[in-house]
Image (spheres, helix red, strand yellow):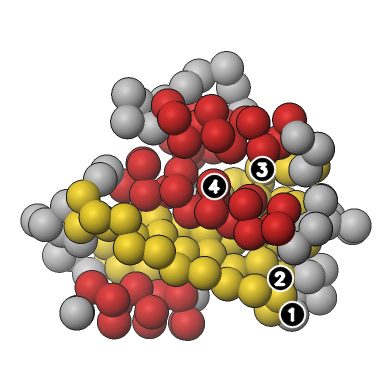
Amino acid sequence: MQYVQDYEAGVTYGVKTEASQHVTVQVRWMRPQQGYLSLNTDGAVKNGSQQAGCGGVIRNDSGNWVCGFAKALGPCSAFVAELWGILEGIIIAKDRNIMRIEVQVDSTAVLQCLTSSKNGSVRGRRLVRKIRELIEQGIEVQFKHV
């Protein structure tokens, strides 16, 4: 239950904590380019248990909340949890007819994977393919590192 509370606090207050060192990094919202909505996602794995989750929020270019989500994933890596967050966010955007979205990513490994021809880890390949398939179906996605 502490994992859920930590995750909710991170989403609510824009703060991430890492491992048992309790390093806090302030994350702020960045305005998307004109004509786009922003999708901020994150994935996290509870230290020692491999239990993971992801979540995200879609905001308009004024920073107003459009929708959000959270999902328990079970055991997986942080890389895979990050990919799940992006996939779920893009699916929700498409379901709401949001066809131009700026995906703001904090993982350089995930960003490099999605903006190159790489497919990522063995466990992440399927998710990378699904993300690319959604993009090919007409949703315009820009990836940005935050």
**Crowding near pointer 3: few (<14 within 10 Å), some, many (20+)?**
some
Of the numbered discs in the image, which one, if any, rests on residue 87? 4
Compared across the picture, whether 29 is left or right of 26 comes to right
Numbered badge on residue 59: 2
Q: Quadrant of residue 124?
A: top left
SS category of the residue bearing label 3: strand
Say what amino acid the circle numbered 2 marks: Arg
> Contact (CB < 8 A) between labels 3 and 1?
no
Q: Residue 143: which disc?
A: 3
Q: x%, y% of residue 113?
A: 51, 28
Q: Is residue 42 visible?
A: yes
The kind of residue tagged 4 is: Leu
Label 1 with label 2: CB-CB less than 8 Å? yes
Q: Position of residue 126 (x, y in %)?
A: 44, 30
Query: Could you give the CA–CA distance between mark 2 and mark 4, rounded to whole angstroms?
Result: 17 Å
Q: Which residue is mark 1?
A: 64
* Place of residue 87 in the rendered image (x, y in percent of width and height, measured from the top left): 54, 47
From the image, which quarter does the N terminus lie in? bottom left
Q: CA distance from mark 3 to mark 4?
A: 13 Å
- Side (left or right) of 50 relative to 119: left
Instruction: Return the disc, 2 or 4, that comes first in the chain's sequence.
Output: 2
